[in-house]
Amino acid sequence: MGFSRGIMELPLLSFIFLCILFAVPSCARYYTPPSVPRLTDLVPHVSIDQCFAKIFGASNIQLRNNGSSVDLTLDKVSGKFYLLILAFIFGPTLFSFITFSLLVFGGAGLVSRNKYHYGFFSASIKLPAGLTSGVVVAFYLSNADVYPHSHDEIDIELLGHDKRKDWVIQTNIYANGSVKTGREEKFYLWFDPSVKYHDYTIIWNNYHTVFLVDNIPVRELRNSEAFYPSKPMSVFVTIWDGSEWATHGGKYPVDYKHAPYVASFEEMEINGSISTPTATVPSGSKTNVSSPDTVEGPEFIKLSQQQIDAMDWARRKLMFYSYCKDTSRYRVLPPECK
């Protein structure tokens, strides 16, 4: 019996030994997350088809379920024509680095038909399966098309993994003209985001900006006069080639032998104050979503103790980079870091 039990334990011991030997972080990162309120249950879904327009890679954008879901695909040729149109309309300052990458490698993207000044923005996303090094799937707010030299931006970027399967979420914020240096924080995800859909959420109001994953806050920036996004922004949904930086600083570029890469989006939620409504009022506008006052209610303007504890859990266990700790980059730390 003892010999049989020892034989049965060998695979487990071997697995633990390999994790230690090769220091593969993903071996121990599938945690059970803490319980938190589901803020995404408080905001209705919108029609992607009616709330968003295609900006590049139209042939790689596939709407599903009567416009409530969408697949975005990255391959080596998609997106070139549409980005050339964007460059002609907006000039070379529009997302210069991203645009260059997309012109060379393709991708696909949507932009909201309206601009919003504060709100609740969420998408349920399933990431491409398989080896996805260099692939970037982004859900973010930006006004770089209007303010190319002083834009605001609130980013969720989901960074593809190498063979070690280190899925990463990068959060970033630009505000008040701070366009040369971002304020990135990076986290390992505690699940495989290619197996099923997970919620990625941005709360942006006059009180704070919060990034949430499956309703768990991972980062909060409180409003301050020195640094805070303040101008109306559009919502963007994109997939593109970030080979030069996305996976381990560019060590692992996109391998198009594994293409196409498909990111799926559903259960989109937008609840905000529309700054420039379009002539036609689609779903997702004031007529179809709850009042912007809702996202300034008590659940949205201040984290509860339960949410604070959950954010502390995420930051202790899963955050591996914060600009606030990067003294080689910032000789004097930004004021919000203190």
Image (spheres, grey):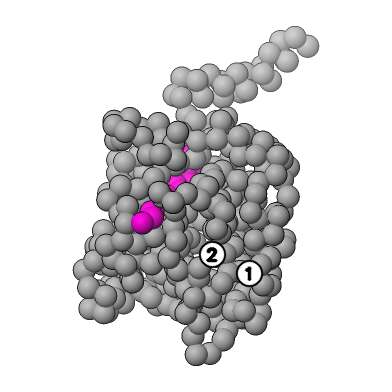
Q: Position of residue 44 (x, y in %)?
A: 69, 70
Label 1: which residue? 292
Secondary structure under the numbered disc 2 in the rendered image: strand
The magenta stretch spans residue 255? no
Q: Which residues are magenta?
A: 165-176
Mark 2: few, some, or many residues within 10 Å (few <14, many ≥20)? many
Mark 1 vs 2: CB contact within 8 A = yes
The quarter holding residue 87 reads bottom left
The magenta stretch spans residue 167? yes
Which residue type carries mark 1?
Pro
Label 2: which residue? 118
Mark 1: few, some, or many residues within 10 Å (few <14, many ≥20)? some
Specify whether residue 29 is in view: no
Q: Position of residue 67 (x, y in %)?
A: 58, 78
Please name the residue shown 40% across and 49% down the image. 226
Secondary structure under the numbered disc 1 in the rendered image: helix
In front of the other: 182 or 66:
182
In front of the other: 117 or 39:
117
- In what quadrant of the picture does the N terminus appear? top right
Please name the residue shown 65% across and 46% down the image. 303
Please name the residue shown 65% across and 49% down the image. 302
In the rendered structure, the answer to whether residue 330 lies left or right of residue 70 reads: left
User: What is the C-alpha distance between the residues marked 1 and 2?
Assistant: 8 Å
Please name the residue shown 60% across and 34% down the image. 312
Q: Position of residue 223 (x, y in %)?
A: 51, 51
